[in-house]
Amino acid sequence: MNRPPRPRSATTARIAGNVRIVGGRWRGTRLPVPDIEGLRPTSDRVRETLFNWLQPVLAGSRVLDLFAGSGALGLEAVSRGAASAVLVERDPAQVAGLRAAVDRLQAGAQVQVVQDDALRWLAGQEPADVFDLAFIDPPFAAGLWHGALQASVARLAPDGWLYLESPSDQVPEIPAGWTLHRELRTAQARAALYRGPGQGRADTLPAADPAP
C-alpha cells in the first residue's frame, strides 16, 4: 500500500543554497535558502542596486517585507540603517530559518518574523500600523500582485516607498497616485521602486540602466 509523503518539517528542509547581505553592519552574512517550490530570492546584484537607490531614505524607516522568503530584503534594510522590519512568511520551514537568522544576528529588538499568509496578515492590521517601505516579491506563479499591492499601500505612509518584483515581461497595475521612481530588468525579473503620493516627495527619476 502506497503511503502519502510525509510533510517536511521545519528542521529537515533541504538547503538549496544561500544569499548574502551585501551592505551595512551585517555585510557578508549568508542567509540559507531552503529548497521550497516558488522560492526565488532577489539576486545579490539586484539588491545592491535597489539599496543604492534607497540608501538616502533608509535611516530610521519602518520596513515591511511581505513573502519574505530568505529575508534578504528586510534584513538588508535593517543592516543599512532601517529602524525596524516585519518579515511575513507562510512556509514553516522558511520561518524557522528566518528566526534562526534573526537570533544569530541578535536582531530580535528590530526584526519581527511573522508566520502567516501575507494577504491575511495585512487584512488584520490596525489602521495606525504604518510602514515607510514595503517589499513585495511573491512567488511569480501565484499571481498575487494585485491583492498584495492594494492591501499593502493601505499600510504605507503617504510618502512611502514600494518595491515590486515581477516577471520581466509583466508590469502589474499600481494603485492610483503611486509613481515609478526607478526600475531595472534582468532576463528573469523586473525590479521597480515606486513612491507614494504624499506631499514633499522628490520628482521621479529616469529609469536605471538594465542589469546585465
Image: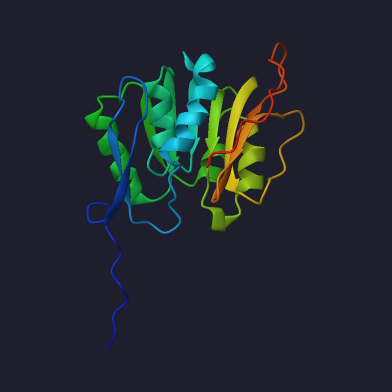
Residue 149 can be seen in this image: yes
Q: Position of residue 160 (x, y in %)?
A: 61, 22
User: Image quadrant of residue 96?
Assistant: top left
Q: Write the residue at 54% across / 51% down.
A: 188
Give the color scheme: rainbow, by chain, secondary structure or one colour. Answer: rainbow
Side (left or right) of 136 relative to 77? right
The residue closer to the viewer here, 155 or 174, is 174
Image quadrant for the N terminus? Answer: bottom left
Q: Is 165 situated above or below 206? A: below
Q: Is 84 situated above or below 43? A: above
Side (left or right) of 55 relative to 75? right
Q: Position of residue 134 (x, y in %)?
A: 54, 31
Residue 129 can be seen in this image: no
Q: Position of residue 91 (x, y in %)?
A: 39, 51
User: Image quadrant of residue 2?
Assistant: bottom left
Q: Position of residue 210 (x, y in %)?
A: 59, 38
Q: Residue lying at the far front in this picture: please name it.
A: 212
User: Image quadrant of residue 98?
Assistant: top left
Side (left or right) of 83 relative to 189? left
Q: Residue lying at the far top in this picture: please name it.
A: 200
Q: How many marks?
A: 0
Side (left or right) of 116 relative to 125? left
Q: Residue lying at the far bottom in this picture: please name it.
A: 1
